[in-house]
Image: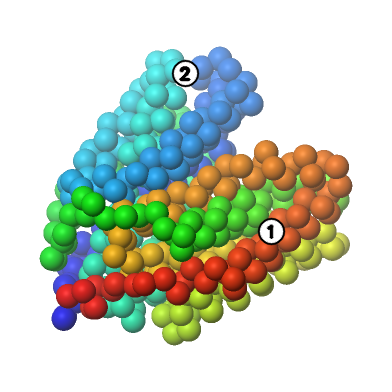
Amino acid sequence: METARLTRVQRVALYAGGFLGPFGGLMTSSILPELGASYGISPEEASVSIMVYLLPFATTMLVSGSISARWGIRRMMTTAYVVITAAGVLCAVAPSWHVFLAGYFLLGVSNAFTNPLIVTLLSRFTAVDRLGRTLGIFGAVAATGQLSAPLVSGLFAELTWRYAFIFVAVYALLLCTIRLPSIPNQQRQTGSRTLSWPIVWLCVTNLTIGACVTGLGFLVALFAYDNLGSSASERGIILMIGGVSSLIVAPLAGSAVDRWGSRTVSLAALLISASFILAVPLAINPLMLAVLWAVAIPCALAVALSINKHVLGLRSADSAISFVQAFRFFGAGVAPMVLMPIYLWQNAWGFIVAAIVLLATILLHLVARPFDSQRATATETA
């Protein structure tokens, strides 16, 4: 069956929507002093805003796919953009800290109905043999959102941090004006089964890369400070290099998934990532540390792309995709709680333990073989 087509404007709008979720979660990270000063609290107290966004974002993703499969993806995404617009305005004009947190909480919940659903829509309008590259481009846009959030909000904060949230509101409002495509041959999955053992193993893998790679940035920055004497700006550059490399590598990783398959790419990427994380304690200067980080982060993205493409081929894809993706954000959230005590005991062991967990995940894949589960691609089911 011929794959349905998107207009150029619709495809660009879908890619652009992938910018919002990662951007929203990190936009307060560089403006904590200004945010705290507006409400008479310390920057440390203002840092709770990051958790207020990320935890509802990840938790809602557990069910956003199922809800959208029942009520319609286009309807839920349009509603999400409307709510994001309102939440951005609420944050921008919030007269008190608690009102701001309420708006930011709402921003996190509503963004859980953007990124995973965009992935689903893109899969419906992309031929199977080109899906990996499409997901790679989407991953690059998401990486741009994550990379640019501290910079953009910091620039706005030179005038007032509130303009950053006005920017989010206007951005979402513009996306509302572009009519989303209707899904061809959509069947609402009111009774589809999301949870199965292969899905559980893939959730564990996402949890692992979230905790032991993408969520390890804070530990890399601490290592640079404690062992290499890096300044704040130098630590920021080291972490930024990881984001830039992800932006460059994402489309290539997607093409690799198309060519060699999800299982092969994910296993190779896990092994490379584990090796480079294991080598972090051996870094003798900031440049070496930046190179190690610049390889480890794109490998984690390659694993995520492999998982996404596989899940999109399952019969329960609409409900499963957001569920599986949520665990990557949960992993990033638990990383400080789990790895910080180990790092404080012995710096090197914080990274050694993370690498061991990644290697154990490889063994899990070799035994459980989650990528061998039954698939039902759009071509097969048409």
In this view, the residue farthest toward the bottom is: 259
Q: Is residue 295 visible?
A: no
Residue 112, above or below 44: below
Identify which amino acid the numbered label 1 is placed on: Val
Residue 343, above or below 182: above
SS at mark 2? helix
> Does 87 sit left or right of 379 as displayed?
right
Question: Are the two marked residues, 1 and 2, in contact with CB atoms closer than 8 angstroms?
Answer: no
Give the x, y percent position of residue 165: 38, 35
* Quadrant for the N terminus in the image: bottom left
Viewer-nearest of labels 1 and 2?
A: 1
Q: Counting residues from the N terminus, which is met first, the one under dot 1 or under dot 2? A: 2
Q: How is the image coloured?
A: rainbow
Q: Is residue 356 visible?
A: yes
Give the residue at mark 1: 357
Residue drawn at x 24%, y 67% is 124
> Does 304 sit left or right of 78 as displayed?
right
Residue 91, above or below 181: above
User: Closest to the observer: 197 or 13?
Assistant: 197
Q: Which mark is residue 97?
A: 2
> Does 211 sit left or right of 101 as displayed?
right
Identify which amino acid the numbered label 2 is placed on: Trp
Residue drawn at x 22%, y 54% is 189
> Does 371 sit left or right of 295 as displayed?
left
Give the x, y percent position of residue 3: 19, 76
Residue drawn at x 35%, y 22% is 93
SS at mark 1? helix
